Image (cartoon, grey):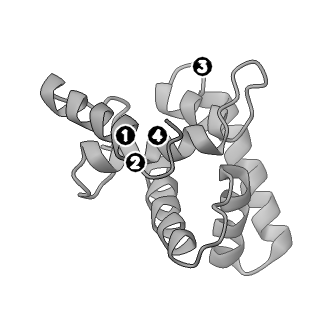
Amino acid sequence: FIARIYTDKILVDELDDRGHTPRQSLPEFLYDFHLELLGDPILAQEACINVVANVKRYSQQSPRARMFARFLLLDPAHPLNLDNLNTFLLALVKIQKGMLPILPNHDYLNVEASRGSKVVEYIFSQAPYIIK
């Protein structure tokens, strides 16, 4: 589920960028995702509550759920804002060379050191929305 949300968020961000509109935060996107999927604001809100409950439940044992919780601003001691999310998603796209799935079905993604260095170099030297 988290991989699907990230993938859909990347696609919507691309449309936002092309339309010169601001990107949504992950909480905003999650609600809109469910609203489009379910077609009812109350059902979308209930689905978001369910996601939040599950993310909180699994965030102690799953690094993926823990990171997702931080992007949803559910960890007040360690929140990650939209800029952090943009950087993270860009790194995922570059690491996976734009291929799907953006994340494997398990919690860990192994990356060759040389590939990782190239991704970091790209993000911090060429990415247009990273303030240098």
Q: Which residue is mark 2?
A: 127
The residue at the point 33 percent across, 29 percent down is 108
> Residue 113: in sight, yes or no?
yes
Q: CA distance from mark 1 to mark 4?
A: 10 Å
The amino acid type, in three-letter code, at marker 2 is Ala
Q: Which of the 4 image quadrants contains residue 67?
A: top right
User: Which element carries disc 2, helix, strand or loop?
Assistant: loop
> Residue 110: in sight, yes or no?
no
Whichever of callouts 2 and 4 sits on the residue coming sooner in the sequence is 4
Left or right: residue 110 compared with residue 48: left
Left or right: residue 66 compared with residue 113: right
User: Which element carries disc 4, helix, strand or loop?
Assistant: helix
Q: Which residue is mark 1?
A: 123
The amino acid type, in three-letter code, at marker 3 is Gln
Whichever of callouts 3 and 2 sits on the residue coming sooner in the sequence is 3
The amino acid type, in three-letter code, at marker 4 is Phe
User: Could you tell me if the residues under marks 2 and 1 are in contact, i.e. CB atoms within 8 Å?
Assistant: yes
User: Which element carries disc 3, helix, strand or loop?
Assistant: loop
Q: Is residue 62 above or below residue 38?
A: above
User: Which element carries disc 1, helix, strand or loop?
Assistant: helix
The residue at the point 52 percent across, 60 percent down is 9
Q: CA distance from mark 3 to mark 2?
A: 32 Å
Instruction: Give the foreground label among 1 and 4.
Output: 1
**Mark 4 surroundings: few (<14), some (14-19) or many (≥20) residues within 10 A:** some
Q: Which residue is mark 3?
A: 60
